[in-house]
Structures are given as C-alpha cells and as structure tokens.
Amino acid sequence: MTRIFEFGGQTFELAGEAALFWPHQSTLLLSDLHLEKASAFASSGQMLPPYDSLSTLHDIAALVGQYQPERIISLGDNFHDDAGEVRLPPDASALLQRLVAQADWVWITGNHDRNLEARWGGQSVEELVLSGIMLRHEALRGEAAPEISGHFHPKYRQNLRGRIVSRRCFVRGPRKLIMPAFGAFTGGLDAQDVAIYRACDLAGSEHAEALVPTRAGFVRFRLECAGAFAK
C-alpha cells in the first residue's frame, strides 16, 4: 500500500496520522496544534494532564527528523488561545525554538489564536498560496483555487462488532482538503457531520471521502450526509 495521493495537481504523502509532506515544496503541513489546551482548561477548573504541548512538539520533531522539510506550515489554532504563547512551559518553549530554527516556519492564524505573535520566529500570516493551492485555517466556500485547511478536526467513526471506533482522517473533495487536528487532547468532529460536508463545497454529483491513515497506507471511505444541503 502507499501513503501517497494527489490533490490540486500536486502529490502529497500522509506523514504519521495527522500531517502531510509535500515533496514538490519540501513542506510539512500541520493543523490545529492547540498548544497549551490543558493549561487553558486548568484555568477554568477542568484538569487535564499538563503535557499536551510537549507531546505534540515531540511528535512534530519526529516527523521533522524523518522528512527533513525545508518549510513547516501550521494551519491555524496553533495555540488554544492567544495567551497560550505566554503559558508555554520552558521545556516546550525550548523545543519549539529548536524546531522553528530547523526550517522556514509559517504560522497561519486561526479562530483560537488570531493575535498570534510568533515570538519563537517564523512568520505569521492569515493565508498563503503555494503552487496554486490556497492554505488557510477554515475552508471558504466559493474559493476558486484548490484549498487545504483545518479547523474541523475530522474523525471517521465506524461500528466494528458493536463498538464505535474513531480515527483521525483527512477529508478530500474535488477542491477541498481538510486536515485532522495534530495536537494532543484536541478531540474531533464526525467526518460525516453536516458542517464538514458543507465545507467541502460540493456541486452536483460530486462527493467527498475520508482518508484514514493506517500503518501501511490509508483506507478511503465515501462520505454521506443526508442533511448536507438543508438550509
């Protein structure tokens, strides 16, 4: 099996369970890191293990070591909130600084971190176009160019022997590619939810599919949503 697929006239490789490597651009694509989500929840009395940021950054470091990208692009909601940059603990901060120094890092802002300062280096932008493909945080209906985004944290859910199994997935339509959340503790939305289906901006007989990473490659599932075009 292969982990390679095409979108927007370009070839991509599934990197781990929730990232993409873009060989033509020597770029690693990530989305929805939600760094410091645990500390944000702790401030409101909801306790989560306080190691989400470090775990997420170690996972990124492993992919950087494997693919050696020249560029890393994070597609928004990099931090769980605007104050997350300040709360990032010293060990996670040091690791992030090393990662940003290893490649041309681009932070795309999201709805959780619109005021991202990129204090560890790199550049902060609202959106970016590479090789004719639009990169932004949330899919924009009516966008003419092929588009890669995040925001929805898609997961494919399947009933296996009476048990619901949920896996992170990529959602691919003719013009839209929606990435799963990369960060720890991020949760996810059913890939067949009406919000995701509408974001795919389908027309006529077009359909979207879930790409679910496996150890050897990926499995494709056609997505259906009966209420997708309801007003």
Image: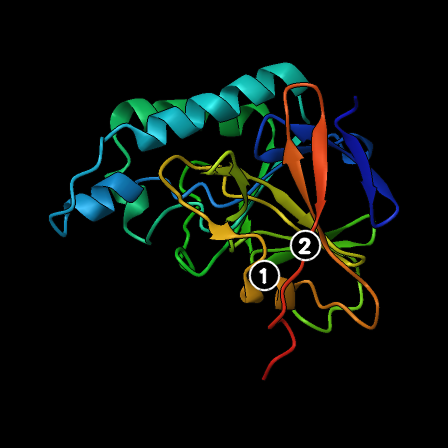
Image vertical order of residue 138 relative to residue 46, above or below: below
Question: How far across and down, in percent of the image, does residue 144 sit?
Answer: 80, 68
- Foreground residue among 106 and 168: 168
Kindly give the residue lying farthest to the left in the view shown. Answer: 45
Kindly give the residue lying farthest to the bottom in the view shown. Answer: 231
Question: How far across and down, in percent of the image, does residue 126 sit?
Answer: 57, 59
Kindly give the residue lying farthest to the top in the view shown. Answer: 65
Residue at disc 2, secondary structure: loop
Q: Quadrant of the N terminus?
A: top right
Residue at 23% across / 47% down in the picture? 40
Q: CA distance from mark 2 to mark 1?
A: 10 Å
Residue at 50% across / 55% down in the picture? 109
Task: Locate residue 64 relative to residue 96 in the image: left or right.
Answer: right
Image vertical order of residue 226 relative to residue 75, above or below: below
Give the labeled residue for mark 1.
Answer: 196
Question: How far across and down, in percent of the image, does residue 157 sit?
Answer: 53, 44
**Numbered mark located on residue 223 in the image:** 2
Q: How is the image coloured?
A: rainbow
Neighbor class of circle 1 (other Cα within 10 Å; few <14, some 14-19, many 20+) is many
Q: Are marks 2 and 1 in contact (CB under 8 Å)?
A: yes
Neighbor class of circle 2 (other Cα within 10 Å; few <14, some 14-19, many 20+) is some
Count how many numbered circles sit on residues in the image.
Answer: 2
Q: From the viewer's perspective, is the residue at label 2 or at label 1 nearer? A: 2
Amino acid found under the numbered disc labelled 1 = Ile
**Numbered mark located on residue 90 in the image:** none
Q: Which quadrant of the structure image shows residue 113?
A: bottom left
Residue at 42% across / 52% down in the picture? 116
Residue at 62% across / 57% down in the picture? 127
Amino acid found under the numbered disc labelled 2 = Leu
